[in-house]
Amino acid sequence: MEIISLVITGLVCLLVGATVVFVIGKTLLKTRAQSIIEEAAKEAEVIKKNKLLEVKEKFLHLKADMEKQANARNAKLQSAEAKAKQRELQLNQQQQELQRKKAESDAIRANLDTQIEIVEKKKAELERLHKAEVERLEHLSGLSAEEAKEKLIESLKEEAKTQAASYINDIMDEAKLTANKEAKRIVIQSIQRVATETAIENSVTVFHIDSDEIKGRIIGREGRNIRALEAATGVEIIVDDTPEAIVLSAFDPVRREIARLALHQLVTDGRIHPARIEEVVAKVKKQIEEEIIETGKRTAIDLGIHGLHPELIRLVGKMKYRSSYGQNLLQHSRETANLCAIMASELGLNPKKAKRAGLLHDIGKVPDEEPELPHALLGMKLAEKYKEKSDICNAIGAHHDETEMASLLAPIVQVCDAISGARPGARREIVEAYIKRLNDLEQLALSYPGVLKTYAIQAGRELRVIVGADKIDDTETENLSTEIAKRIQDEMTYPGQVKITVIRETRAVSFAK
């Protein structure tokens, strides 16, 4: 019984403990759940606030973007409106100008209509008077107008043929007597035609400056700087309204180069006054002189020419600053020298002498003094002065037939000089213009009746014209060559002279059977 009581007591205690534990656990769970709910509510509130802030921030960003886009659209609209207004203004001005021009055109047209009406009336009156006069003459002569015209033309043709046949020989003889005078006249006319262009191209150097402000500094107070510069260099300095440019004018290319380099140094340095100008010009002159001598030495070394007098070397260097028909004289002399050497080698002559003569053949164009002599004779005298051999001196003097040729070097130098100047592009003539000139020569001759073929040869300096023997007689060939020469002279531009040769050939062929 006692054990039962103990068991029951234990069960009761266990049940009571379980109840207490359950009650306590439930209370703890309820408390924990409440705290979790409160924490969740707090976190939800924080999250809610953060989200609201994010939404507000995003809204502000979107608002700013929309305002920016709206401002950009407004600016574009304003710009478009301004352009539209400007365009409208331009259109209005153009419309006014068109209306004004239209009014002027209407006035001119009305005036022309009036003048045309007057002319038509005068023309009708003239025709009436001419008709009446023709009828009167027909009545007096007993011939119609057409018959009288035909008889007059026939008589004039016969008279013209007779006079032409009788005067041809006289004209040819007179032409032979006056050929030299006529040639000089043609040369003078040609010089007059191209003198201005040639003078401008060969006597002017343009000096470019950064701004027009420098022009005032170059001129100086009361023009003292520019006068000092002109006196020191011997070059005329032209300061006009041309933007960012000063023109240096002088016939001596060395002086122009000295003036250009001196101006460049003065402008770069910034100190421009008379004393400084004289100092810089003297320095540049010395520099140019040294460069001339160096150029001459380098040219002689490149060509393998030795033993030249120092003064001849200096003259060769001066050729760098001289041009002939747009062709650099030093380059021309080098070309001539190389051609002379090649030609002399082919003919079994001394190529070194030929090269020497070719290099020196134009030294008469760059003397320090200006005597009244052709450049070939002047070059010969200079070569003799500086102890060149007689055959070389003769080749220099005879390359333009100024003196008699005394050696085989002379014709070689003459021919090579012509070759260097005659090649396409050598003397300010591009290949396209050269080819066009040849085609124009041939087409001009082909335009005449009876001409079968034409050939422009010798770089356009001779034109061969082949005519049909059955279409043109011997007398007409002479007239044809004269007419072609006159047309070429009047209508075309060309260097030197063009020889026109008209060829008429008759062949008689038969067979012995």
Image: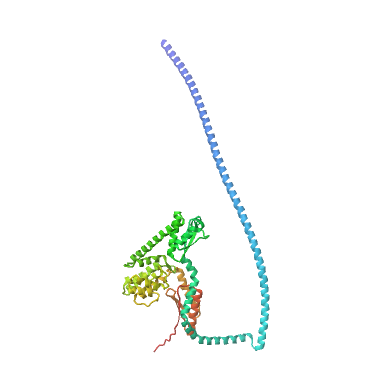
> In which image quadrant can residue 426 be found?
bottom left
Residue 470 in view, yes or no: no
Q: Quadrant of the C terminus?
A: bottom left
Q: Position of residue 194 (x, y in %)?
A: 49, 70
> Residue at 62% of width from left, 55% of height from top?
89
Compared with 344, 229 (above or below) is above
Identify the image quadrant of residue 52. Answer: top right
Of residues 243 and 95, the one nearer the viewer is 243
Q: Residue at x 67, y 87 (%)?
A: 139
Looking at the picture, how far across and down is residue 433, in whole percent? 46, 69
- Image coordinates of residue 390 in percent, x first then y, are 33, 74
Horizontal side of residue 438 vs 120, given as left or right: left
Whether residue 354 is visible here, answered yes or no, is yes
Quadrant hosting residue 506: bottom left
Q: Position of residue 373 (x, y in %)?
A: 41, 73
What is the image's colouring?
A: rainbow
* Along the line of sight, the residue nearer the viewer: 165 or 269: 269
Residue drawn at the location 66% of the way across and 72% of the way down = 116
Q: Nearer the viewer, residue 396 or 465?
A: 396
In this rendering, the count of numbered labels is 0
> Left or right: 139 with respect to 362?
right
User: Which quarter of the image is occupied by the N terminus?
Assistant: top left
| 432 relative to 63 in the view: left or right | left
